Amino acid sequence: MCLWGVQMHFIGISVSVVLSMVGAAHAVVTINVPPGTPGAINAAIADALPGSTIQLEAGVYHEGQVIDTLGKFITLKGVWSDEGHPLSILDGGGTHTVLQCKNGETTQTVLTNLLVQNGLASDGAGGGLSIVDASPQVMFIEFKNNKASINGGAIACVRSSSLIGGCTFEGNSAGPDAHHKGQPGYGGAISIWGYDGGQHDPPGVFVDDSTFNNNSVSQGLYPPGPPPDSGPGYASGGGIFVVEATVQISGCTITGGTALRGAGLAVYYSTSVVGLTDCKITHNDGDGIWVQSGAQIGIESGVIQNNAPAGISLEEGAQVTGSTSSGSSANPSICGNVPDQTTGCLVCFTGEFDVQDICPSSVLGDMNGDGVLDASDLELHHAAVGICKSDVDHDGDTDVMDLLWVIDGWGGVCP
């Protein structure tokens, strides 16, 4: 066996090649692409051999066009900081989708250690990343401020079995803005469509150890209600939107989402099967979880809390099962949602759930279960023991003595 290294340089790209001779030559290549040359990443992908790594440096890359992995067995890799954030930034400039995998990519295609931002899918799906009939691994990527006119502000998965792990989704959105008509948005962060005309079982997508924060979908000017032959009529799935697919979501936090239905998670159609394991779905505006008739969700442990107007909303015929996970001794907790913990089909729940109006808290004196000790907790305490908040001296009356207490403390510094 003979090993040697070769260094080549062209159009600002450094290529390191290691050749291994065992009867025939096999090349494993690392192509180093610095920022500053639009089109350089696509050029490197076009030249890459199977098994190659496209190594990006720290900096901002304005490719000027969608980055297409061309169905190749490659790794597109950025630089990771010591603090745990990507330093290699792919910026769509608000003009185009940033990345796409649409040529049968498998899990041998890996996208990792990147910040993907400001992508725009003006013609439909996947502002940050569009995946169609492909299943790349998407690992340790931060998706920020990406937008799609219809599906998947950050990622649109169509007939995919991708693994999405260790990612962060912040400020992504889907749907038309207030000045344009069109379909409502689906999947502010991720939309997952498994429909293939009934030819195969719905694909399976895995979302693991990821964080979703402040992702949203908009209705635009479309009137709420079922549109003709074009999908759900309500802006759905501020965090994740699922249609006719099998999806496993584990160890994720989904918070601050906005939608008309399922601001955290929305699941449509009877062939959808979703598993939630040890997830936290909290502070979403438009229900934490919304499930259409016929769809199935299994929830193992985890917490659905402080969402509005409900933690979980179900249509008749939906199926939701609760259980403990192997990593937790607790049942799924549904608590602190306002005004309702659950709405819709109550008989659609099976298994074990812990449902409470106020979430248990580890913070002493935290009356409303939001994890913070503040004035709202004091008001709840006063109400619980029958004290009026204007009764400063707690003697049961609001009178001049209460005013004197306030005057006596005027100008003081509270701890």
Image (tube, rainbow, N blue to C red):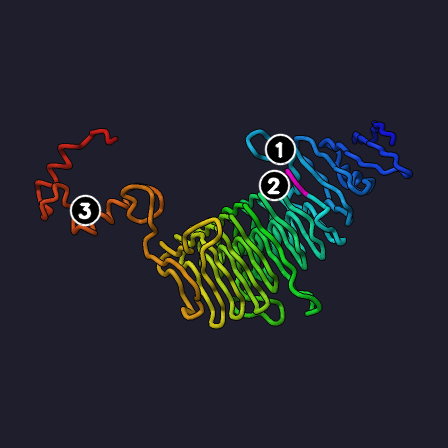
Q: Is residue 208 left or right of residue 330?
A: right
| Three-letter code for the amino acid on which mark 3 is drawn | Lys
What is the distance, in whole Å, between disc 3 and disc 2 at their CAs? 49 Å
How would you classify the magenta stretch by its main secondary structure? strand
Residue lying at 90% horizontally and 39% vertically, measured from the top left: 24
Q: Are marks 1 and 2 in contact (CB under 8 Å)?
A: yes
- Numbered-mark total: 3
Instruction: State which quarter of the image contains the C terminus.
Output: top left
Q: Is residue 108 magenta?
A: no
Callout 1 environment at 10 Å: few (<14), some (14 to 19), or many (20+)?
A: some
Question: Of the residues under marks 1 and 2, which one precedes in the sequence?
Answer: 1
Residue drawn at x 10%, y 37% is 404
Mark 3 or 2, nearer chain start:
2
Label 3: how many Cα within 10 Å (few below 14, some 14–19, many 20+):
some
Q: Secondary structure at mark 3?
A: loop
Spot the residue most to the front.
1
Q: Is residue 74 left or right of residue 179?
A: right
Q: Is residue 72 above or below residue 337?
A: above
Which is nearer the eye, 410 or 325? 325
Which residue is under mark 2? Answer: 140
- Give 330 or 380, whichever is nearer the viewer: 330
- State the separation of the CA atoms marked 3 and 1: 52 Å
Residue 136 appears in the rendering: yes
Residue 289 position in % (x across, y down): 47, 59
Residue beneath the point at 85% across and 38% down: 26
Q: Position of residue 112 (x, y in %)?
A: 66, 40
Residue for badge 3? 389
> Mark 1 — residue?
80
- Residue type at mark 2 is Phe
Which residues are the magenta region? 111-116
First in sequence, mark 3 or 1: give its number: 1
Single out the mark in the foreground, 3 or 2: 2
